[in-house]
Image (cartoon, helix red, strand yellow):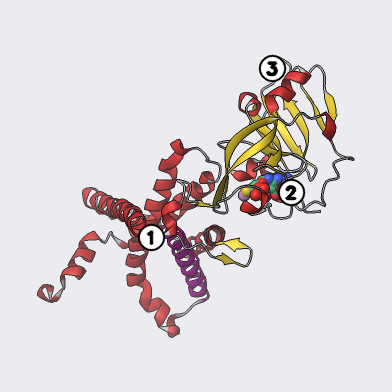
Amino acid sequence: MGEHRGPVRRVVERLQPPPRIVDWSLFVLVGFEVASGLVSFTLGTPDWWPVFWAHRIAGLTLIPVLGFKLARVRHRLTDIGQWRPSTALSVLTLLAAAGALATGIAWVLGVDVRLAYWTLLSVHVGFGLALVPLLLFHVASRFRPPRRADFEGRRTALQYSALLVGGAVVYRGQELLNRAVGTAGADRRFTGSQPREGDGNAAFPVTSWVADDPDPVDRDGWSLTVDGAAAEPVDLAYADLDPTAEREALLDCTSGWYTVQRWQGVRVGDLLDAVDPDGDARYVRFTSVTGYRWSLPIDEARDALLATRVGGEPLAHGHGAPLRLVAPGRRGFQWVKWVERVEIRRQGDPAQWLVTLISGFD
Ligand SMILES: Nc1nc2c(c(=O)[nH]1)N[C@H]1C(S)=C(S)[C@@H](COP(=O)(O)O)O[C@H]1N2
Ligand SMILES: [Mo]
């Protein structure tokens, strides 16, 4: 029989790990993708590039492993007589995985379409999150513990190294090809975000998290409270601000776009100096009129800006007027809009993770 096998088939068979290893590595790879994908949302500075690379390479490695799996179980899917309730779940799991892979790859290749309100990158994240409960159910309904004999030591390790190296080579090749052909995918940042060009309010989208959508803030009724662990808290009217500080900063949203703008406003360090922070102050918390909030370590906060203008224009309501945080090196969701309170604190604020997600829901 051996002499009838084609060369492709022989390579596949040589690379194919044992079935249970295939199943477990799918589980581990998907777990890694979900974890690294979520963590990547918090990373905004280029020294974190390995996380993004690992996410892409593991994603590409998933494709052949998923292929091995499909080749093995395809008769269960195609033979309707064999369908069980758990088969439907398996198909949904497969669709979520295929959807996440397809949207991830399309995004890398520069496909920058919107599905209703969502960027393709957001759809990718949606598929990935849907995959979590589906995969857990799938594993629970078909769980088989790995056996010692499954780990044929060196052979399996070699197979996996080959798959990972293959993934890295394909990803690197894609980068070179994207650049050579000059697709939109070539302009992506290390985070995967695509550029939005131009200056001022109209140059980049208004992006709010889930349900945070306040009425326009009336400047005359608004004031900025600077308080907390400080000797002399103050309450500043808009006219009390001296918005003459200026800096260029890059806003990178986790939905997949970035923009470089000149922001003008008040340096947070100047606000802090005015209220005389206590010696043990360690964080500064910025809170929106909606309750949305984020904290920065005090030294980083000093260097941040509370902006009243962008690209030479007064900030539009959607972008956070009258005052929004500009936090260079942080992802967009940390750039709190419609700020009304700056609070000096001794501790961080773990609850901010939950508050930002549910802010705006009644
Ligand atoms: N109060 C508040 N601030 C917010 C948000 C929000 O929903 N509410 N969205 C954040 C997100 S996810 C991003 S990417 C930026 C987007 O800023 P922009 O709308 O000016 O583009 O604002 C951040 N600040
Ligand atoms: Mo965002």
Task: Say which amino acid is labelled 2.
Answer: Ala
User: Residue extending furthest left?
Assistant: 3
State the predominant SS element of the stretch in magenta: helix
Three-letter code for the amino acid on which mark 1 is drawn: Asp
Q: Residue at x 49, y 77 (%)?
A: 84
Q: Residue furthest right?
A: 221
* Cα distance between the residues tagged 1 and 3: 51 Å
The residue segment tinted magenta is 85-109
Where residue 23 is drawn, which disc sits there? 1
Q: Is residue 113 above or below residue 220?
A: below
The disc, 1 or 2, on the residue closer to the chain's N-terminal end is: 1
Q: Which residue is drawn at the image coordinates 82% and 52% (left, top)? A: 215
Inspect this view and state whether residue 208 appears.
yes
Q: Residue furthest top?
A: 279
- State the SS at label 1: helix
Where is residue 166? Give x, y as percent: 28, 54
Nearer-N-terminus badge (2/3): 3
What is the number of the mark on residue 316? 2
x, y (%) of residue 286? 72, 35
Amino acid at the residue labelled 3: Asp
Separation of residues labelled 2 and 3 (CA atoms) = 36 Å
Q: Nearer the viewer, residue 169 or 91?
A: 169
Q: Residue furthest bottom?
A: 81
